[in-house]
Image (cartoon, grey):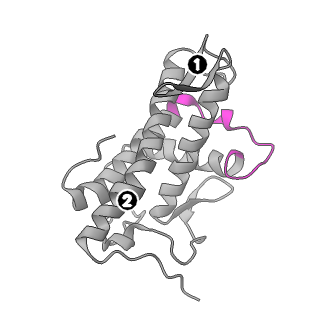
Amino acid sequence: MAVIFANFPTDKERVDVINHRVIPRMREIDLCGKVSKYMQDNNCFDGTKSFSSASFKLTDEEFYSSIHSRQLTDPVLDTGITMVRAMLQFFHVGIHKDGHMQPYKGHHDGNIVIQSFQIEKPIRNPDAINFLFKCLTPSEIESIRVTAMNGNKGVAHLTIHKTASIPLNQLSDACFAMNKLLNYWLVNPILGKSAEL
């Protein structure tokens, strides 16, 4: 039985969904990219080092303050990893357990995908005009692949696999590259500008 994707036939619907559903996820991805880059730049590449302090505050209310910064940075990274994986699936791409990219076949009725916005699905054939990754470098594509693969094993499902196997430099590259893809294929064509993150 064929999956029935969400459909946004009007400009207003498309703009609303981008502003209220897509861009918030892009912000999560962007935060993960910035945090992982900061961790890499500050020699926190082993996956265990903590910074001297960390806090999370909303106006005057402090929800978290500790010397164990990993308790704050790890959820940020996990969210970003999950969103990179989810947005790759938005483009109908999944990762096989052996690590290669393949068509994603796990969609359900009501899922939001690129075609939901009246945009033809980009494909993974590098010779095609609508090649999905044409706005990315080979290293950015590899970073997305590594992040999504390890996200499958270490974040989306509770397994013995550790997400520390995603190098921080590749995680930050994957985050920035995924947002580049979303801006290129979706946000710019609909909004006429890149997302403000």
- The N terminus lies in quadrant: bottom right
> In the rendering, at what x and y percent does residue 160 appear?
81, 43
From this view, report whether residue 39 is shown above or below residue 83: above
> In the rendering, at what x and y percent does residue 137 appear?
37, 43
Q: Quadrant of residue 21?
A: bottom left
Q: How many residues crowd mark 2 within 10 Å: few (<14), some (14–19), many (20+)? A: some
Residue at image location 30% in from the left, 67% down from the top: 14
Magenta segment: does it hold 159? yes
Q: Quadrant of residue 173?
A: top left
> In the rendering, at what x and y percent does residue 130 appear?
31, 65
Magenta segment: does it hold 15? no
Residue 138 in view of the camera: no
Along the line of sight, the residue nearer the viewer: 105 or 107: 107
Is residue 133 left or right of 39 when viewed as pictured? left
From this view, report whether residue 32 is shown above or below residue 10: above
Residue at image location 63% in from the left, 47% down from the top: 151
Is residue 162 left or right of 131 when viewed as pictured? right
Residue at image location 63% in from the left, 52% down from the top: 99
| Residue at the outermost bottom position | 1
Number of the label disc, if any, that sits on residue 54: 1
Q: Amino acid at mark 1?
A: Ala
Residue numbers of the magenta segment: 154-170
> In the rendering, at what x and y percent does residue 162 appear?
73, 38
Residue that badge 2 annotates: 132
Q: Amino acid at mark 2?
A: Leu
